[in-house]
């Protein structure tokens, strides 16, 4: 298939794969053709007409758009002829006649394709003496996006992205001809989880982000390439800062992972870095009051404790750390026999996963090469958003999609088979014979299958998933992707010797067996469905050391508080994604005050304890992390810093998770996580803080009728715990299923195994809810 | 000069009830379809159409038989009748829809038989409410008689026909825009390649898109053979054509004639000359998109090729006569405004360029022009249609933008002094 | 949803006519127009629900076509043609007369919601230029005097059904062609009178 054809461009012969678009073939050979509407990741529309070139045809030279013309063997192309130049100049003039001259106050200026191309190809002066088209200057089309229609050149990138890629076409062309504008529907704002991508691909300053507006000029920006640690997809990012403040995150086109896209949480959840509430100095609790202290004093007190062989130590570890941080903890913990090397990961959904020998692991790209995709996991759109985009892409390219459960209702519209209601019970158990399901018989048996498998809810029993996975492994050529959904989970399970989940924490950890608890970047009290139990446990433990960015419901219980650097932009290290791809985390801005990286703190403490381990340097930790790999494939800093490895290196780890079976765990409700929640970082990121604040439940229309709800609001009551919430109709949910998001404030305090009284709330007017 | 009535024969002979199925059948209607479906073969129909050499009557003049031959194999194929007649000057499909809808339906049945199609649509422009009602009535009558629906004429052929009303967009006359519109989308032309209707048409399935007049000709061709049809008219422009004559003529109207006589003869005899014995200053030979001819070019023959050889087009068969008193700048402005209003807005040159041309012309027409405006007009035109040649080169997806260039180049080539006279002499201060 | 049951029923019937739901948007928008005299946000939401696309996608379609009005129209939509054949046959005068009579500029509706005026592109009545449509029913061969009389008649009689033949006989002149057929069907709103939309009536 590597056959190539030859085309002649401007008198030079270049090679190209057949059927490539001319604009791409030229680009690959270093010949740049100007363009606005064409974007590598979007279907070509040939609208802006900027990329016109001349090709020779039997009827003479013809002007054609290079973005819609496929190369053919022996094609003769001129991208620089007088006719081409005239046409390009003409198009630019047309684009500029209605474009405002507000570059001095435009965020895009300095990195604006229209500005750049006008300089390179445009006419020197304007011949347009009429009045320009006017629209109201920027209108807010969502909490995070502004639209300036005067600047818009109608390239349809944003509309195509929403329609083709993210599948939520909420921004569209309105009117026609010269009156055409891009807009949203009045009652239906641009409430997409992916809206920030439209800002990034807008070739002018028509779409801008509230978070970046008027903040900086491109030429003042510093930038590094990094990896988003928001979820295990691990999107490649470019971080931008000015004057040591993080100001913007862009997606980098990592072909195997995010292909340039980011979810809005990944893109906008950074303002907390600059929050005045960041912890800056070490704190120590005295008489229930936090007092500033020195790190040295904490080290001294802790090393005294640790050196006492009667001290029992445990670790509750978050998923926001780097692999090197995890290695440091692991090495550190080796010094205490009492812990059994167990790390409780701050995740309700973690379970043993499917990593055994004989189970093939899936890469994200495998989705594109599968005949069928089977999904039974948490809601991908809410929890692994860019993986959701890749699933959409694969389905668009022809893969059959088979979805189990109630959790992925956002995939229902594009699923070929959606098995909820009769096939998956409310307890998330498949209650039919898998082999007899039509979608399985026709599209899975003996086919190439990629399965995305994970717990749909913390209450799902592991064994329920086993059944499906066993069937797939035995009956199809399947690859399995374990859909853990929390930050650098894969880095944690690779680098920590023994990992358990929060449920295990509640069962195993208590004040009786723990004298010293390290809580690292975790707020289970604020997020976990086991919040109440965890709260009780931690409260009773005598010595709690919290490493965190902020004081929150959990870190407030600490006796010692260590301010830490954020993995986002304040640290160097590595991150491992859902397909075991390890890539670079990089540092761009300083962390505030006396903040330390997790590993720096642990390293210092080790030294105070006179432990003899090799965790004194980041490079050392990095080497330690990958010491078992061949030098060639190892994702060491040295290897990752080679340009050919910027997209990361995939390795075959054998993770060590030893979660215990979770029988007796039941829920009367469908509990899950939403993309935006009441997390501490979102709370302190102004642009998006409101998006995670609204409290709501979801159910089908008929379920809502049965609950006698009608005013738009309701109250959830249980044992004196009351939460007022909106309800949202989601008819894709099976009847009787009530969805409650665990990561909205106070929701995780309910005991979901017991009935929650849901009653109408007539006192207030219906609220608009997203 | 006389008319040759093929398509308009029934309506002329039965003026008051030509739209009713009884009248149509009394005069032999649906017999051809019956015979074709029972005794004929799809291959035979295609052959007759090819022999007839009929060329599409929508404007582009593409050979119908060849078009049918391109239709790709597929379980689902569609026929869409383009009744979105909106080209200024054109009202010939209106008469065929209003006064002889069954002839069209019979043509559709035969066409679908030939192309193995079970679903057809008639896309009628929204402003043609009355014609659409007549067609809908006719469709209902045909269903009642069993000429549409299941097992037509006991031939095992099934055909469903839906009358679809547009909503005011000239661009939907462009076949791929029409398909988008019929799919419930914005009427924006699609890219060709890859969206050739015969391969990826309605719902991305192979689709025939044919004009009302073209398909209305099918029953006659099948009844009288392609060979007979081919004898009418002249080579390359066989058969009859319904010309819509308007403007400053004494007898405007639709006239069905064999192609080949001159515009002059046509206007003099059937049009009964120019009103008040005025002279023709300019005329449009084929709808608003076509470059104009001068009054001294009335001897050009009304064939597709003759008009093309004189750098214009016979297009939709709309002939608009403009007498010696006509303000041609206003006339051109009217046409440019039309295209600016009807531009879909996809392509930058058309979206921005047509409106800009309209603005400049407006300035010139109202005496606020500048000396540089003539060059500016031509250069803006050149950026829409490079080289200002005919047939037009385009910087756009579809020919709508370049159509707006036609009246301006006509004006500048032949009536430049009329434009110049409107531009105030520059006063030096 | 604020369409009543009979409209929803009608809508579902229309959707069934097409191989794909989305094709029904066009007729459904005509239906919406017949209900309110324009495409209300509410109707847009109903159609989006019926067809299964977003509201802004419906709006994107409805705003593309000039016959779907984004503002409420009067009882009579007066559409005077200004394209080439009418232009050279004094359509400007007809436009001025209608503007004068109604006191309206282009795309305006009077306070009584009686008239909406618009100057439109070609309505396919070029042989009978100048011409206009009232609620998409054509009158050809207009003179200024007759145009005023037509407007006066509309204002005075306020007929519920607009019938082209009736207007043509009383106020029209040269026709594009012989209309020949005696037809007393017409339209009942500022929307094409068409069976599928339930917007046509016969005058008894």
Image (spheres, coloured by chain):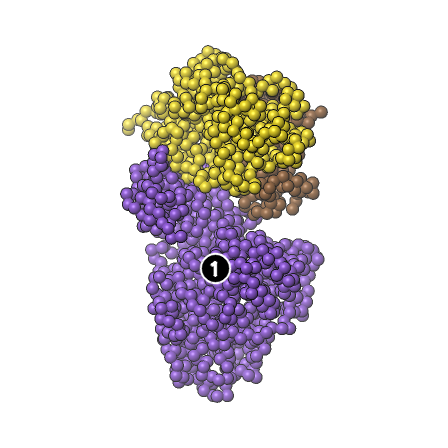
Chain colours: A purple, B yellow, C brown
- Quarter of the image where one finds residue C193: top right
Give residue A403's position: percent from left, percent from top: 58, 58
The answer for which chain carries disc 1 is A
Question: Camera-side residue: A206 or B102?
Answer: B102
Question: Camera-side residue: A108 or B169?
Answer: B169
Give residue A33's position: percent from left, percent from top: 34, 45
Q: Residue at x 46, y 54 (%)?
A: A196
Q: Residue at x 39, y 23 (%)?
A: B309
Question: Camera-side residue: A517 or A125?
Answer: A517
- Quarter of the image where one finds residue A699: bottom right
Q: Residue at x 39, y 81 (%)?
A: A613
Which image quarter is the C terminus of chain A in? bottom right
The residue to which callout 1 is attached is A366
Decide: is A305 above or below A4: below
Q: Is residue A431 visible?
A: yes
Give residue B241's position: percent from left, percent from top: 51, 22
- Quarter of the image where one finds residue A728: bottom right
Secondary structure under tag 1 reads helix
Decide: is A209 above or below B273: below
Residue at the far bottom in the pictured view: A309
Give residue A389's position: percent from left, percent from top: 49, 56
| A33 on left or right of A177 | left
Q: Residues within 10 Å of mark 1 (few under 14, many from 20)?
A: many
């Amino acid at each position: 298939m590597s056959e190539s054809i030859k085309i002649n461009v401007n008198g030079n012969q270049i090679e190209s794969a057949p059927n490539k678009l001319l604009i791409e073939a030229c680009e690959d050979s270093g010949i740049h053709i100007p363009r606005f509407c064409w974007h590598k990741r979007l279907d070509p529309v040939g609208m802006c007409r900027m990329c016109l070139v001349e090709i020779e045809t039997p009827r003479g030279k013809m002007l054609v758009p290079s973005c819609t013309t496929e190369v053919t063997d022996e094609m003769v192309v001129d991208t620089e002829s007088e006719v081409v130049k005239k046409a390009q100049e003409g198009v630019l003039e047309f684009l500029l006649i209605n474009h405002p001259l507000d570059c001095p106050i435009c965020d895009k200026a300095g990195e604006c394709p229209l500005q750049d191309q006008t300089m390179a190809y445009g006419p020197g002066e304007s011949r347009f003496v009429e009045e320009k088209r006017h629209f109201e200057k920027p209108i807010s089309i969502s909490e995070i996006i502004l639209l300036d229609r005067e600047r818009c050149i109608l390239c349809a990138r944003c509309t195509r992205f929403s329609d083709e890629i993210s599948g939520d076409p909420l921004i569209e062309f309105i009117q026609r001809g010269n009156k055409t504008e891009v807009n949203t529907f009045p009652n239906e704002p641009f409430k997409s989880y992916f809206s920030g991508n439209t800002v990034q691909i807008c070739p002018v300053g028509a779409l801008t982000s509230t978070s970046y507006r008027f903040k900086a000029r491109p030429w003042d920006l510093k930038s590094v390439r990094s990896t988003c640690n928001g979820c295990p997809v691990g999107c490649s990012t470019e971080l931008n800062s000015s004057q040591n403040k993080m100001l913007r995150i862009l997606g980098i086109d990592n072909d195997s992972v995010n292909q340039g896209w980011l979810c809005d949480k990944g893109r906008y959840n950074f303002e907390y870095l600059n929050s005045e509430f960041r912890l800056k100095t070490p704190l120590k609790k005295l008489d229930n009051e936090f007092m500033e202290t020195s790190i040295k004093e904490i080290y001294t007190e802790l090393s005294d404790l640790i050196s006492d062989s009667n001290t029992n130590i445990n670790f509750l570890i978050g998923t926001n750390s780097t692999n090197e941080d995890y290695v440091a903890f692991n090495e550190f913990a080796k010094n205490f026999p009492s812990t059994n090397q167990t790390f409780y990961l701050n995740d309700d959904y973690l379970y043993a996963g499917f990593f055994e020998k004989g189970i093939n692991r899936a890469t994200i790209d495998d989705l594109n090469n599968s005949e069928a995709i089977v999904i039974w996991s948490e809601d991908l759109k809410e929890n692994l958003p860019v993986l959701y985009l890749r699933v959409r892409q694969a389905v668009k390219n022809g893969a059959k999609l088979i979805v189990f459960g109630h959790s992925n209702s956002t995939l229902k519209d594009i699923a070929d088979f959606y098995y909820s209601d009769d096939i998956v019970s409310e307890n998330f158990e498949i209650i039919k014979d898998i082999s007899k399901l039509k979608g399985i018989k026709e599209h899975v048996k003996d086919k190439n299958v990629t399965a995305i498998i994970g717990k749909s809810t913390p209450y799902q029993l592991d064994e329920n998933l086993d059944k499906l996975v066993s069937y797939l492994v035995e009956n199809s050529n399947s690859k399995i992707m374990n859909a853990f959904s929390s930050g650098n989970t894969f880095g944690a399970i690779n680098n920590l010797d023994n990992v358990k989940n929060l449920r295990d924490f509640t069962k195993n950890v208590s004040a009786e067996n723990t004298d010293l608890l390290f809580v690292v970047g975790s707020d289970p009290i604020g997020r976990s469905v086991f919040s109440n139990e965890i709260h009780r446990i931690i409260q009773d433990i005598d010595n709690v050391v919290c490493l965190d960015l902020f004081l929150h419901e959990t870190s407030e219980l600490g006796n010692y508080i260590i301010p830490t650097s954020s993995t986002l932009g304040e640290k160097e290290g590595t991150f491992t994604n859902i397909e075991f791809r390890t890539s670079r985390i990089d540092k761009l801005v300083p962390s505030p005050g006396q903040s330390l990286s997790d590993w720096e703190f642990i390293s210092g403490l080790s030294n105070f304890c006179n432990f003899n381990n090799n965790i004194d340097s980041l490079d050392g930790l990095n080497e330690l992390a990958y010491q078992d790999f061949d030098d060639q494939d190892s994702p060491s800093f040295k290897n990752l810093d080679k340009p050919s490895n910027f997209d990361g290196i995939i390795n075959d780890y054998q993770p060590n998770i030893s979660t215990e079976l979770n029988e007796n765990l039941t829920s009367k409700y469908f509990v899950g996580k939403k993309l935006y929640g009441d997390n501490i970082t979102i709370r302190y990121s102004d642009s998006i803080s409101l998006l995670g604040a609204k409290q709501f439940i979801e159910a089908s229309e008929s379920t809502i009728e049965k609950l006698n709800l009608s005013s738009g609001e309701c109250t959830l009551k249980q044992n004196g715990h009351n939460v007022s919430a909106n309800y949202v109709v989601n008819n894709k949910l099976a009847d009787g299923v009530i969805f409650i998001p665990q990561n909205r404030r106070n929701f995780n305090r309910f005991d979901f195994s017991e009935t929650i009284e849901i009653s109408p709330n007539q006192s207030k007017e219906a609220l608009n809810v997203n | 000069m006389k008319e040759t009535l093929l398509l308009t024969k029934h309506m002329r002979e039965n003026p008051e009830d030509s739209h009713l199925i009884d009248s149509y059948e009394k005069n032999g209607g649906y017999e051809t379809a019956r015979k074709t479906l029972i005794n004929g073969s799809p291959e035979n129909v295609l052959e007759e159409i090819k022999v007839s050499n009929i060329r599409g009557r929508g404007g582009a003049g593409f050979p119908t038989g060849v078009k049918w031959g391109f239709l790709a194999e597929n379980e689902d194929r569609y026929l869409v009748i383009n009744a979105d007649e909106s080209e200024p000057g054109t009202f010939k499909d209106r008469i065929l829809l209003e006064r002889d809808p069954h002839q069209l339906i019979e043509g559709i049945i035969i066409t679908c038989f030939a192309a193995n199609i079970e679903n057809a649509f008639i896309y009628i422009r929204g402003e043609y409410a009355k014609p659409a009602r007549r067609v809908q009535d006719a469709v209902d009558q045909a269903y009642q008689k069993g000429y549409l629906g299941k097992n037509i004429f006991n031939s095992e052929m099934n055909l469903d026909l839906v009358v679809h009303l547009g909503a005011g967009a000239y661009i939907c006359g462009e076949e791929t825009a029409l398909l988008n519109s019929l799919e419930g989308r914005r009427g924006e032309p699609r890219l060709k390649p890859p969206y050739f209707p015969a391969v990826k048409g309605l719902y991305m399935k192979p689709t025939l898109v044919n004009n009302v007049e073209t398909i209305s000709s099918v029953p006659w061709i099948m009844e009288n053979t392609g060979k007979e049809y081919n004898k009418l008219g002249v080579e390359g422009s066989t058969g009859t054509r319904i010309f819509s004559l308007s403007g400053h003529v004494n007898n405007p109207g639709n006239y069905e004639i064999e192609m080949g006589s001159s515009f002059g003869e046509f206007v003099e005899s059937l049009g009964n000359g120019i009103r008040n014995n005025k002279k023709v200053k300019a005329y449009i030979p084929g709808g608003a998109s076509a470059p104009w001819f001068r009054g001294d070019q009335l001897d050009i023959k009304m064939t597709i090729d003759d008009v093309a050889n004189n750098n214009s087009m016979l297009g939709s068969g709309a002939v608009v006569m403009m007498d010696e008193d006509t303000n041609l700048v206003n006339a051109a402005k009217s046409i440019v405004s039309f295209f600016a209003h009807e531009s879909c807005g996809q392509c930058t040159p058309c979206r921005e360029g047509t409106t800009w041309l309209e603005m400049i012309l407006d300035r010139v027409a109202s005496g606020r022009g500048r000396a540089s405006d003539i060059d500016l007009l031509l250069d803006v035109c050149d950026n829409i249609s490079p080289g200002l040649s005919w047939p037009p080169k385009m910087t756009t997806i579809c020919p709508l933008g370049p159509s707006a260039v036609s009246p301006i180049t006509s004006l500048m080539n032949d009536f430049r002094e009329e434009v110049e006279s409107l531009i105030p002499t520059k006063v030096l201060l | 949803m604020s369409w009543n049951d009979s409209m929803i029923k009608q809508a579902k019937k229309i959707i069934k006519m097409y191989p794909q739901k989305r094709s029904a948007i066009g007729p459904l928008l005509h239906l919406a127009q017949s209900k309110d005299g324009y495409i209300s946000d509410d109707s847009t939401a109903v159609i989006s629900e019926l067809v299964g696309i977003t509201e802004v996608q419906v709006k994107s379609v409805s705003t593309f076509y000039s016959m779907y009005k984004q503002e409420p129209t009067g009882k009579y939509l007066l559409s005077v043609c200004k394209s080439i054949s009418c232009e050279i046959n004094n359509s400007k005068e007809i436009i001025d007369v209608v503007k004068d009579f109604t006191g309206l500029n282009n795309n305006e509706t009077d306070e009584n919601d009686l008239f909406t005026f618009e100057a439109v592109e070609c309505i396919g009545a070029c042989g009978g230029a100048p011409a206009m449509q009232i609620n998409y029913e054509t009158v050809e061969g207009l003179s200024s005097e007759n145009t005023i009389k037509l407007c006066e008649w509309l204002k005075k009689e306020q007929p519920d059904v607009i019938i082209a033949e009736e207007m043509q006989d009383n106020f029209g002149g040269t026709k594009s062609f012989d209309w020949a057929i005696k037809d007393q069907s017409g339209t009942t709103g500022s929307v094409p009178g068409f069976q599928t939309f339930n917007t046509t009536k016969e005058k008894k």
